[in-house]
């Protein structure tokens, strides 16, 4: 894998280097769907709630179309060979998210507890900012390999971002998790951005150290045990993720970072032993922390027996723990939706109350679009992840491969952790559904993530320059009768 | 690096697959049980999304629905209203947005909301034709005039209950309980409703207005139980006529003790016939009959009248009690309605109705039919025989005894001109060492000249305000029973 891009006979890509079509028109056609579907959904919600087409439909439709158009033109100009699916998938999810956020804005119950009201216009603004960042990524980042230079700066940056919520006066403890910082009235979740920065650090670090990690090891009971000094980094990252868990009570983020690191380590070293260590250490860490952190214990209890937790929350038990009815409310929302859902605007997912339009937004999809709708959403996420990994497969440099798989893996884990938590598959953690959920940090960071993936895929799919004419070949070809 | 990459791709695919499987589990496999979970507020939201069907008496609804203003938090659209709510509460129960429902409102909730499976076909048709969902109606057997007479009579006396039955069918005609409550007061979902509800709870209100005394309270039946004892004597052949001399000494010493069983006042009970004994309400005669028959025969007869089992009308009534293990002295006390004997007003109305119906006890019921929103009948009640506590001839002997009570005994205040009335008074002592004011009882039936018997009634008055000496079944309860019977007879004309 020490290949350079101009030796096509040795590259490891599965995609032919020559003549890959740019597929920009495919992307444009898909984008039309990605804009039209949410516009129809928006009209549908308005008709269901007020019996009339919502007044904001035109501006919403034009706004979404404009954003998608700008993003498309940017890709056409700066990344002409990029994967044609990523942008439409992200646009569709973002558009549907906006519709559901607007729908929850209309709920009088949520308005009365100040959980909604004007989240949709704000989200549209954040989306515009996110698309701007997306375009900026494509414009300024002409080649993703430039990021290798910032390996250690990224490490410092990621740590700073992660620890910001612990800075007194800056961090904000919202509903038991300290993962926000509050700046000038805006709440930001630095963890969302740390995800990308950390992936850059891991990719840069592992690209350099992967041979040492893979080869300098002893075989023990069928597993390759790495040397202590090579084991160091994973222990450090494990320790940091535990620290996050303990001090910010954020199970999701620590699981996400640790999982991302293990995936990248495994890809870099091709050693299964790292996965085994990773699983053992994360399990050990999680169990260890869960034994003394009441916030996490409650979540585990709510996962094991949501009904019991619901009854506790209703009876107002005062045992120093905030009991939450949300897990059960989310299950009821899903169950009430059934196979086909109640129809947009016709469910009662506002009963989830707090975080109905952020962490729990999938429950509204579940209730109003039913099993069919949620499966479609999950498949859209699955497609983003698999296109990301395909980009990693196609990338010709190890840094690009690691970065692409790191970002895709983190994205997949986030979707799994959030959707699994809301659906009661695993304990609930406080993370947001990428693109769907209300929240600026999340939508901006995930558009940046897609921007980086599109940049890598453009580099990977770009046709290699034709081999320089070789004077030797010229001579041997002179065979004339 | 590509081999691990492909594996990671598979791993991510498995993550998505796990989510898809979980989603199918909760949205397909578990969907129905989650959707209909009673804690799921959507169930209540749907219940109040359309006007409820009505509960109907004499062809007119005694319930209604009003649209509540949809404010910020209230997601219920329609609220239940009641006409004469306090009077009908023992029949209807309540349907509250905040506090669920009870009795008929709860038991027939499916029909009233229109969610019942039996309405499925019609609902589907309505959905296709674009009509909104409607609730069906519950048509009761009650008689508005009788209910009004019962409630008015009780109100003038304070606390108490009335149960009236049509002896020939078992149809319940009146079911009143005081003090009562107006279910309209807490039908909504506001703070006012919550306050009204809390005020009615037993812990905040010693009068316990939400107790349905006609069905759920068991009182010592006192002397009215002597009708059951007389039936047992006739059925077991202890005496074969009403006018046979009983071999009862005066004073009568309870068997196995040195305690004397006393009568109220100086009444001719020595060796009295059963007719005389019932007319004057002799404790000695019926106490001795109980002892002579023994507890097993007494219990068997009481059970034939319905003691010992709950009645489902379809609203459940508590089981009345005739004790199972007693010594002969306790049997004597139980046989005059004391010791541990306890009966609901409905139970005592059943006793009177079995006698009036020539010994056949019909199963009490109060829902005549269930109607679809279109007024099509979904189900129609059929009168059903419950048991035969006594033979026709013995029943007629007992009738003549009870008629003597009203004609020239303790129950003269129940007389109605042109109608034959049979009855029995009761004054039940209760409390430790009879410390509390006694309950006044009256059970009776009316018989028309054509021999038919349209109504049997039981009245109990827990009158805390009357002077102790004035409390008697004949004085307090009989006039109420008379008014109820008269209302039924007048409404037949």
Image (cartoon, coloured by chain):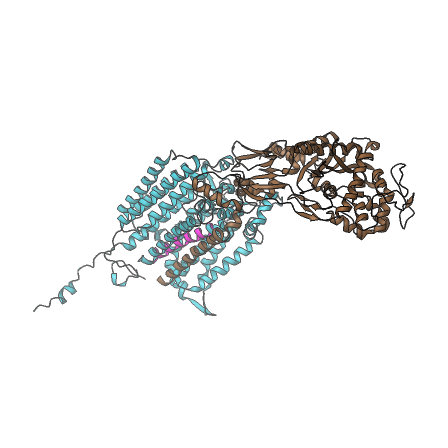
Chain colours: A cyan, B brown
Residue A246 or residue B424, whichever sits in front: B424
Q: Is residue B256 left or right of residue B351?
A: right
Q: Which residues are magenta?
A: A397-418
Residue A223 drawn at (x, y percent) = 45, 67
Residue B366 drawn at (x, y percent) = 64, 41
Question: Residue at (33%, 55%) from the top-left corner?
Answer: A391
Number of numbered discs overlaid on the protein picture: 0
Residue B46 is inside the magenta segment? no
Residue A403 is inside the magenta segment? yes
Residue A224 shows in the view: yes
Q: State the quadrant of the N terminus of chain A.
A: bottom left
Residue A122 drawn at (x, y percent) = 41, 37
User: Which SS type dominates the magenta stretch?
Assistant: helix
Residue A186 shows in the view: no
Residue A353 or residue B408, whichever sits in front: B408
Residue A406 drawn at (x, y percent) = 39, 54
Q: State the quadrant of the C terminus of chain A.
A: bottom left
């Amino acid at each position: 894998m020490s290949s350079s891009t101009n030796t096509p006979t040795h590259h490891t890509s599965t995609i032919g280097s020559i003549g890959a079509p740019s597929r920009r028109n495919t992307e444009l056609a898909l984008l039309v769907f990605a804009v039209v579907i949410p516009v129809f959904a928006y009209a549908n919600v308005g008709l269901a709630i007020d019996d009339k087409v919502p007044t904001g439909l035109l501006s919403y439709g034009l706004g979404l179309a404009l954003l998608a158009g700008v993003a498309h033109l940017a890709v056409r100009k700066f990344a002409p060979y990029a994967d044609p699916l990523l942008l439409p998938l992200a646009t569709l999810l973002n558009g549907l998210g906006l519709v559901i956020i607007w729908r929850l804005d209309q709920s009088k119950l949520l308005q009365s507890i100040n959980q909604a009201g004007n989240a949709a216009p704000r989200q549209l603004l954040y989306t515009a900012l996110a698309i701007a960042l997306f375009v900026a990524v494509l414009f300024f980042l002409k080649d993703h390999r430039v990021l290798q230079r910032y390996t250690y700066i990224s490490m410092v940056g990621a740590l700073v971002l992660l620890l910001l919520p612990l800075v007194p006066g800056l961090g904000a403890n919202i509903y038991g998790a300290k993962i926000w910082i509050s700046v000038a009235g805006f709440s930001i979740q630095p963890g969302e951005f740390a995800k990308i920065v950390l992936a850059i650090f891991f990719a840069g670090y592992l690209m350099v150290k992967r041979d040492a990690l893979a080869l300098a090891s002893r075989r023990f009971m069928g597993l390759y045990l790495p040397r202590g000094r090579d084991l160091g980094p994973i222990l450090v990252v494990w320790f940091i993720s535990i620290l996050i868990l303990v001090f910010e009570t954020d199970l999701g983020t620590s699981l996400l970072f640790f999982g991302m690191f293990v995936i990248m380590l495994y890809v870099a070293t091709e050693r299964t032993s790292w996965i085994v260590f990773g699983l053992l250490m994360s399990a050990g860490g999680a169990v260890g922390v869960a034994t003394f952190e009441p916030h996490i214990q409650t979540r585990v209890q709510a996962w094991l027996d949501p009904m019991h937790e619901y009854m506790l929350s209703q009876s107002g038990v005062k045992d120093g723990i905030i009991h939450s009815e949300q897990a059960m409310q989310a299950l009821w929302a899903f169950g009430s939706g059934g196979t086909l859902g109640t129809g947009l605007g016709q469910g009662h997912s506002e009963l989830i109350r707090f975080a109905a339009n952020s962490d729990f937004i999938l429950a509204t999809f579940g209730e109003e679009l039913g099993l069919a709708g949620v499966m479609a959403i999950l498949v859209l996420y699955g497609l983003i992840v698999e296109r990301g990994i395909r980009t990693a497969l196609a990338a010709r440099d190890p840094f690009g491969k690691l970065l692409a798989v790191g970002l895709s893996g983190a994205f997949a884990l986030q979707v799994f952790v959030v959707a699994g938590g809301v659906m009661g598959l695993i304990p609930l953690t406080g993370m947001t559904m990428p693109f769907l959920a209300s929240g600026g940090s999340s939508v901006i960071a995930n558009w940046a993530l897609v921007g980086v993936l599109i940049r890598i895929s453009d580099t990977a799919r770009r046709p290699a320059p034709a081999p320089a004419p070789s004077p030797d070949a010229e001579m041997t070809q002179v065979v004339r009768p | 690096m590509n081999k691990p990459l492909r594996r990671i791709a598979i791993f991510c695919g498995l993550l998505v697959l796990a989510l898809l499987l979980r989603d199918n589990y909760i949205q397909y496999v578990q969907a129905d049980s989650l959707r209909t979970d009673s804690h799921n507020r959507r169930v209540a939201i749907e219940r109040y999304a359309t006007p409820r069907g009505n509960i109907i008496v004499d062809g007119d609804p005694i319930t209604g629905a009003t649209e509540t203003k949809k404010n910020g938090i209230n997601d219920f659209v329609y609220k239940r209203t009641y006409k004469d709510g306090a009077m009908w509460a023992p029949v209807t129960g309540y349907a509250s947005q905040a506090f669920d429902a009870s009795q008929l409102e709860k038991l027939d909730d499916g029909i009233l909301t229109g969610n019942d499976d039996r309405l499925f076909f019609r609902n589907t048709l309505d959905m296709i034709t674009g009509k909104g969902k409607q609730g069906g109606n519950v048509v009761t057997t009650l008689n508005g005039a009788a209910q009004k007479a019962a409630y008015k009579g009780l109100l003038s006396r304070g606390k108490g209950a009335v149960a009236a039955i049509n002896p020939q069918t078992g149809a319940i005609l009146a079911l009143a309980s005081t003090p009562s409550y107006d279910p309209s007061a807490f039908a909504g979902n506001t703070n006012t409703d919550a306050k009204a509800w809390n005020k009615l709870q037993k812990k905040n209100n010693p009068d316990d207005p939400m107790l349905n005394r006609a069905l759920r309270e068991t009182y010592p039946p006192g002397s009215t139980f002597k009708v059951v004892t007389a039936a047992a004597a006739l059925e077991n052949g202890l005496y074969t006529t009403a006018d046979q001399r009983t071999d009862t000494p005066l004073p009568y010493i309870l068997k196995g003790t040195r305690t004397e069983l006393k009568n109220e006042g100086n009444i001719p009970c020595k060796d009295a016939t059963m007719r005389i004994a019932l007319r004057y309400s002799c404790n000695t005669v019926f106490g001795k009959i109980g002892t002579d028959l023994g507890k097993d025969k007494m219990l068997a007869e009481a059970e034939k009248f319905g003691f010992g089992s709950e009645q489902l009308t379809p609203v459940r009534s508590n089981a009345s009690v005739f004790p199972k293990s007693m010594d002969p002295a306790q049997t004597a006390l139980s046989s005059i309605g004391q010791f541990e004997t306890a009966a609901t007003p409905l139970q005592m109305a059943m006793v009177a109705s079995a006698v009036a119906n020539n010994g056949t006890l019909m199963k009490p019921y109060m829902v005549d039919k269930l109607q679809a929103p279109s007024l099509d009948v979904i189900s129609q009640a059929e009168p059903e025989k419950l048991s035969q506590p006594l033979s026709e001839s013995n029943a007629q002997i007992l009738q003549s005894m009870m008629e003597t009570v009203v004609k020239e005994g303790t129950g003269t205040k129940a007389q109605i001109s042109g109608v034959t009335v049979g009855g029995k008074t009761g004054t039940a002592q209760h409390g430790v060492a009879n410390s509390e004011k006694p309950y006044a009882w009256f059970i009776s039936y009316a018989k028309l000249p054509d021999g038919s018997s349209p109504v049997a009634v039981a009245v109990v008055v827990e009158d805390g305000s009357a002077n102790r000496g004035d409390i008697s079944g004949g004085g307090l309860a009989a006039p109420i029973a008379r008014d109820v019977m008269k209302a039924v007879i007048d409404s037949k004309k």
